[in-house]
């Protein structure tokens, strides 16, 4: 089983739609969680950290469910500019190394 | 400005040659990482280091080597033993001392075997 798993997509959604991504992780000792965005042929950039209480940044909401070992990202009112690959990242445990999911490709259609 | 710098941005290698990719950070981060990304694929961990003079293999270390002689620098050598080295290589760094601190990435190096 992979340490971090994501649905690779692609998710094709119309503008204005709400889309949700999930990411599961296998190490219950994981401590930190993030969502990154990667545009084509560019480096990943932090979209938002994920806190136990959940957090929101404009149209984006991230949540953590430790009991079920998954994190989620909700994007409301999708824009064309949201088209990208979204990577979930988990860190912590014995080695504290960063583990990336394979990413979920989002394509927002006009 | 603080940040993480990779060089070169593009690199061409002949078959059988070793090449070294540079990664430097001035963020005072303890941890540094090398990832490989193939077209349409996610990031796969090659090597990582959490302290000077120490590093660990990731999931795809075969055909690669690293060193961590200074906290700021974590160069990656792609050796001739790496059979399919054409890929996008990303270096990242992060702190180990705080919760929920992000990893910063360099702009990446595109390596092509010619």
Image: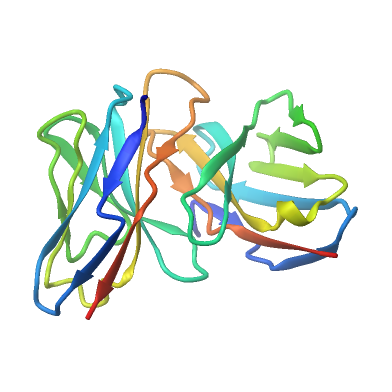
What colour scheme governs how the chains and residues are painted in the rendered image of this protein? rainbow
Q: Is residue A88 left or right of residue B82?
A: right
Q: Quadrant of residue A10?
A: bottom right
Residue located farthest toward the front when viewing the structure as drawn? B1
Residue A3 falls left or right of residue A79: left
- Is residue A95 among what the camera can see? no
Dividing the picture into quadrants, the one containing residue B15 is: bottom left
Splitting the image into 4 quarters, where does residue B11 fall? Answer: bottom left
Give how far across and how far down residue B1 sits, in percent: 37, 24
In the foreground, B47 or A108: A108
* Residue A47 screen position, x and y as percent: 62, 38
Residue at 27% across, 76% down: B84
Direction from residue B11 to residue A27 in the image, left or right:
right
Camera sees residue B66: yes
The image shows residue B38, relative to residue B54, as above or below, that is below
- The residue at the far top in this view is B98
* Total numbered labels: 0
Residue A85, given in percent of the width and then of the height, sits at 61, 57
Residue at x 13% of width, y 66% of height: B79
- Left or right of residue B83, residue A2 in this image: right
Residue occupying the point 53% across, 59% down: A102
Locate the C terminus of chain B and report the quarter of the image it occupies: bottom left
Question: Foreground residue, A69 or B15?
Answer: B15
Q: Is residue A5 above or below residue A29?
A: below
Determine whether B44 is above or below B22 in the image: below
* Residue B23 locus on image (x, y percent): 24, 43
Please name whichever residue, B58 or B21, is drawn nearer the observer in this view of the structure.
B21
């Amino acid at each position: 089983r992979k340490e971090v798993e994501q649905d690779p997509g692609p998710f094709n959604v119309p503008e204005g739609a709400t889309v949700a991504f999930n990411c599961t992780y296998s190490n219950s000792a994981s401590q930190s969680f993030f969502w990154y965005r990667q545009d084509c042929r560019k480096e990943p950039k932090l979209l938002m950290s994920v806190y136990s209480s959940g957090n929101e940044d404009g149209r984006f909401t991230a949540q953590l469910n430790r009991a079920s070992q998954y994190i989620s990202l909700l994007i409301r009112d999708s824009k064309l500019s949201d088209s990208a690959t979204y990577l979930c990242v988990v860190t912590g445990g014995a080695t504290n190394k960063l583990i990336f999911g394979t990413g979920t490709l989002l394509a927002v259609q006009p | 400005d603080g940040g993480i710098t990779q060089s070169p941005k593009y690199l061409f290698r002949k078959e059988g040659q070793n090449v070294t990719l540079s990664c430097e950070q001035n963020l005072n981060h303890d941890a540094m990482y090398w990832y490989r990304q193939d077209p349409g694929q996610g990031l796969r961990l090659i090597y990582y280091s959490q302290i000077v003079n120490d590093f660990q293999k990731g999931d795809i270390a075969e055909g690669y080597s690293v060193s961590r002689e200074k906290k700021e620098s974590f160069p990656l050598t792609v050796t001739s033993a790496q059979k399919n080295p054409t890929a996008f290589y990303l270096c990242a760094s992060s702190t180990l001392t705080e919760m929920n601190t992000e990893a910063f990435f360099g702009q990446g190096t595109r390596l092509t075997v010619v």
